[in-house]
Amino acid sequence: MRRRILAMAMAVTMISSLAACGSSSGGAESAAPAQETKAETTAAKAEEKKEAATEAAAPQAEGGEKSIEGLTIAFVPKLTGNAFFESANKGAQEYAKKWGITVNYTGSPNAAVADEVQVVNQAAASGADGICLSSVDATGLDDALKSAMDAGVTVGTWDSDVSTDARTIMVSQGTPEILGKMLVDMGADELTKRGKDISKDAIKYCWHYSNATVTDQNSWQVAGEKYIKETYPNWENVAPDNYYSEQDAEKAVSIGASVLQAHSDVDLIICNDSTALPGQAKAAQNAGLTKNDVSITGFASPQSMKEYAEADILEEWGLWDCGLQGAMGCYLTAYVAAGNEVHVGDKINIPEIGEVELLANDSIAEGATTGDVNNGVVLLPERLVFTKENVNDYDF
Amino acid sequence: MKALKRFTKAREAGSIIFLVLLVLLVGALNPAFLAPASLLSCLNDSVVFTLLAVGIAFVILTGEIDVSIGATMGMSAAVAATILRDGGSWMTAFVMAIIVGAVVGLINGWGVSIMRIPSLIFTLGVNGLTRGMIYVYTTGAWVENLPGSFTKLANVKLIGHLTVFYAVTFTGVLAANYVTNHTKHGRYFTAVGDNISGAALVGIPTTGTKITAYVLCGIFAALAGMAYTSRIGFVTPTAGNGYEMKAIAACVLGGVALTGGQGTLLGAAIGAIIMSSISRILVFMGFSSDYDNTLTGIMLIVIVVVTTVMQNREIIRNHHEILLARTSEELKTVQEGA
Amino acid sequence: MNRSLAEKSKAFFKSWEFVLLVILCLEIVVFATKNPKFLKPAVLLGSLNDIISICIISLFVTFCMITGGIDIQAGSIVGLTSIIIGVSWQDFGFNIWTAVILSVLIAAVCGALSGYFVAYCDVQPMVVTLGGSFLYAGIALLISNLSATASYKGISGFPDSFKFISKYRFGDVLPLQVVIFLVLTVIAHILLKKTKYGRMIFLVGINKNAAEYSGINSKLVMMSAYILSAISASIAGIILTSYLGTAKSDLGATFTLQIITACVLGGTLSTGGKGSAIGTGLAAVVIGVLKFGLPLSFGVNQQYMDIPVGALLLIVVICRSLATNPKVVALTHKTQKAAIKKGSVKESLKAL
């Protein structure tokens, strides 16, 4: 008897805990005013969709561009709680308000394929019109995305791509070659500025990033390494196996310190990871080194490196406007979701941002084919290089 | 001589010998590792793990476990960092972080010792809640741009290359080690872990001891969070993710038995040095970081298996001795009776 | 006969599995009323696809926990299995099924190694398997370096026959992998409750020495539990590799805590001697449905999902402790301190 009462009691607590969960999410959002209240969204979604459908139908008769207003896009990062993706979300939310679309930022705190597949399936089942994601794995999400597309959900990607037939439009920050070269060029520039002759001196360098299994960082490293071999054969990589800090800030500092001590003559450390770069800079600062002793560069958001730039620990580092990129990804996904057709070579006018051109897939991946319609790549206008002079111009 | 004998009997002796051998081995392969600055960096870099390992050691000594320590550390770090970023004083940040740690510890202690819920289960639940709360509290964003005056603290040197942080931490550990080994109340932790029923029978407040252990664990996690914040200069919502397992591993490496009642806080601190030095050792040995996990795993298993097997032999030998002593006594009484 | 049936059903209504079933039904009702889409069989059953690995592994980690141990290396074995399949198939040119069998064998050896240390060297299971989780994840990464495909790329392009495992749906609704999970649950249940082996597992967990005296090879039984859980992890790894269509060394790295959560929510005692496969299976599904339904029906962001799972676990264990633990019951009934003391003395005497 007691057990049954217990079961009942538990049932009650379960319901209340569910309710509490609902309200706790509300609390979280009130803390982040940029996000719209999701509870409302879900409630109003059915109506919205109907409206969207009628709206989409109306302009079709006129033969003009179909409006994206009222659509819901699930915006999926590789992982949450990472400065890069949080900034991207901030940007996407700002633009989404202006465009009248709903951007639901949802992702797992772990950068794991299985977790991201779960997020994608959820987003597809929740009735989103489109999914715009940065993929953890180059192929691991293909099946989930394809079945989402079969269910009528438009899929777009940004930052990190999947197979070209598993998505419509990709907003790319550039090919691995462009980004690898950019990393090396920033390093070369720093070295030159402190009086090294990059084409003659035996420059000692190494790479420090998250780990051997993440896709994009490794592809930049491979491309950058190739570029160094071709352009600066006099450079020497002191750690051809690279150093990894697994996006663990504590480890980034420890590894950073070890690298500086084990290779006291290292000239350049390239940190193509947004946790490794501040960690490496912190380690250099702890060791009392400045940009005149060792050159450090890499990719990280401007705000996260501001204090080190101002303390003259590093000269320059780069990234791209991830907020803009996220927003563009959401817009283009919504654009296709609204029923618009685009072909390679078409120009798309993104309100508040400007005109972009749809390129063929092989512009970022060699030998990739492009579908006849609604398939291709948009290159983000520019990549940015930050220094202590311009860092305050950016707020991400 | 006596001191030497006592040293070799101590549980942490194995860990210290192992650490020395490891340092010598790496030093032989790359003499740069033996430079004072490099060796002291091993200590300085271990400050976060030392605090975590010592904190969790209190709980493990009482025979329980705490898998929420990483999340507690992350939460304290996030709270402290937010206060500092928004211009609060160090004191406020420090006190708030400690309060967060103590509260989580108190909840754990309540669940485990009063509600009698197995500690693994309860702290697992608390871990989920706390980790989730970090995301709610920070809205998933990094807490960055902390005042330089605070982030520089971690790098203030006492003598030579030794940071004040580590010196203070290590002194604290030594003091705590003394208290837990040589004072009546301090020994409660091991007593409870060794034999809880026996401890209760001799009048040790077992419930109170366990709660104290958890609160201390939470406070140490908070201290680790403060050290982390100062060392790193920014706090991510994932801060401390997986550190609970590393802290447990550090304890084990330092000779603290997970069954409770055996080991010292000093041992845990030494285990933490070994644990946090692995990635540095790999850098100096010229290994790729790819070997990081493999090496950690092998070291952990080898050390644990070797020490356990040796201890079991010891226990069996002691058993024999006791048996022998008893039987001889019995023989004596029998003979006397005759 | 009739009476025994009545008794059986009575026992069922008293059981922990029944409570879990009630929770599961409640979840489904709450989520479905909020968002009717949730009830679509394709959605509901499809949601199981994403958690199938955790469901399968937790079934057999339960075995380890019943023997009084724990297995936190299973997550790493998932990745190890995946990369062994990928590398041996793509780079060594093995037939895909040979690769699968090889991966299961290697996983079994990994489980046996840890199990050996636990059972024969008397080392703390948590530490051994913690070491194992580092070791096998590390080996997986090293194996991925053997491949011509860089470890960050993931090995893909598996034949359709391999993808069949995760793609086939009975009647276009019921995924094959869910059926595999159900079959494994039944197997685990029969193993535990209907065979001599199961009784040995329980006996070892309740009292290892007593089991030894009664002629059970308790060490072998303990080791076998770790082998079984490693094999289940490799089965999960095979299914996950097929489901994702890519072999990577870091698959499953995030599973550990979820597996343990499923086991303990399923009523397995972490100190050993108690647990059931059906309970664990149900608990895994309860957690999975909660994690799927909250974002779907209430729009909760995935990143906060640790909170409801943690809360569920805490509420359940606290309620159970309030209802069943005599000491806690005494406390809640505000019995005087003396009574507690008496109880504790009595208990300690009993323990002695």
Image (tube, grey):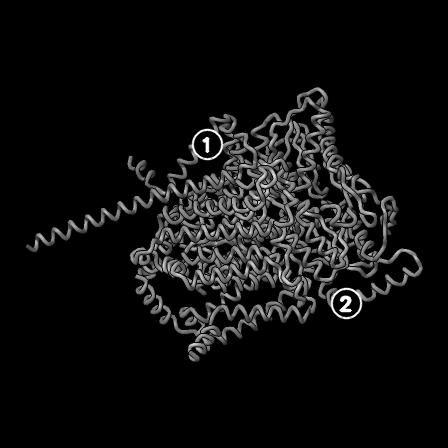
Residue B218 lies, in percent from the top left, at 50, 54
Residue B195 screen position, x and y as percent:
34, 56
**Is disc 2 placed on a helix, strand or loop?**
helix
Tell me the kind of residue under disc 2.
Answer: Ala
The image quadrant where one finds the N terminus of chain B is top left
Numbered label attached to residue A46: 2
Q: Determine which of the numbered discs, if any, sits on residue A71 in the image.
A: none
* Chain identity of mark 2: A
Q: CA distance from mark 2 to mark 1?
A: 65 Å
Q: Secondary structure at mark 1?
A: helix
Residue found 47% across the figure and 26% down from its top: B28
Q: Residue furthest top?
A: A200
Side of C126 relative to A144 (left or right): left
Q: Nearer the viewer, mark 2 or mark 1?
A: 2
Q: Residues within 10 Å of mark 2 (few under 14, many from 20)?
A: few
- Between A8 and A322, the residue placed more toward the observer is A8
Residue B99 visible, this orientation:
no
Q: Residue at the location (67% across, 55% down)?
A: A119
Is A270 displayed left or right of C251 in the figure?
A: right
Give the vertical position of A106 relative to A176 (above or below). below
Q: Which residue is rendered at x = 67% and y = 54% of the image?
A: A107
Disc 1: CA contacts within 10 A as few (<14), some (14-19) or many (>=20): some
Q: Residue furthest right?
A: A62
Residue under the point 44% across and 55% down: C64
Residue C331 figure quarter? bottom left
Q: Which residue is mark 1?
A: B23
Q: Residue furthest bottom?
A: C2
Q: Is residue A365 left or right of residue C54?
A: right
Callout 1: residue from which chain?
A: B
